Image (spheres, grey):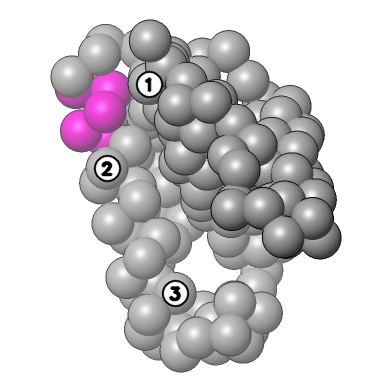
Amino acid sequence: MAASPDELEREHTLSTATSRYDELRMRDALATMAGDAHGDDISPALGRDEALEMLALSEVVIRKAGYGRQAMVRTARGAGASWTQIGAALGSSKQAAWEAHTRWIEDQGRQHDRTGFEGLGPDAVAQARDLAGEPDS
């Protein structure tokens, strides 16, 4: 049975999840190209479990990249960047950048409430809110 994204997330860093995902994706692509070159029906390069692993890994990569993105937003705010500058760096408006970051802070707080250790504790949430400020500050 294939592992869930939650299981794989504990097992992998962003780098190792990306590497494993790329390995599976490349094997799948090469087998598909080989099947096409020989006029065969597309033969699955991956078995069911590996295909499901690749799908779960894609979710892990998205989660970890999203967390890293918000951590960099915090770093930028801490370094004095405005929400206008952060929005421009993300290719969005200052309002959209601030709202996404604020949602992330709240999600991190809820995660900590559920687990007692993951996410951001109450003090860290308060500090993150203070650092985020308002979108026009």
Q: In 3D space, how far apart are the residues under numbered discs 2 and 3 (Cα atoms)?
A: 15 Å
Report crowding for label 2: few under 14, some 14 to 19, many 20 or more residues within 10 A (C-alpha).
some
Q: Quadrant of the N terminus?
A: top left
Distance, label 1 to label 3, CA atoms, is: 30 Å
Q: Residue at x 66, y 62 (%)?
A: 76
Residue with the mark numbered 2: 107
The residue carrying mark 3 is 97
Q: Are marks 2 and 3 in contact (CB under 8 Å)?
A: no
Residue 112 is one of the magenta-drawn residues:
yes
Q: Which residues are magenta?
A: 109-113
Residue at the front extreme, as displayed: 39
Residue that mark 1 sits on: 4
Secondary structure category for the residue under label 3: helix
Is 117 on the left or on the right of 106, as rendered?
A: right
Residue at 26% of width from left, 28% of height from top?
111
Residue 134 in the image: above or below residue 84? above
Quarter of the picture containing the C terminus is bottom left
Image location (x, y in percent) of residue 125: 34, 39
- Amino acid type, callout 2: Asp
- Residue 53 x %, y %: 51, 27
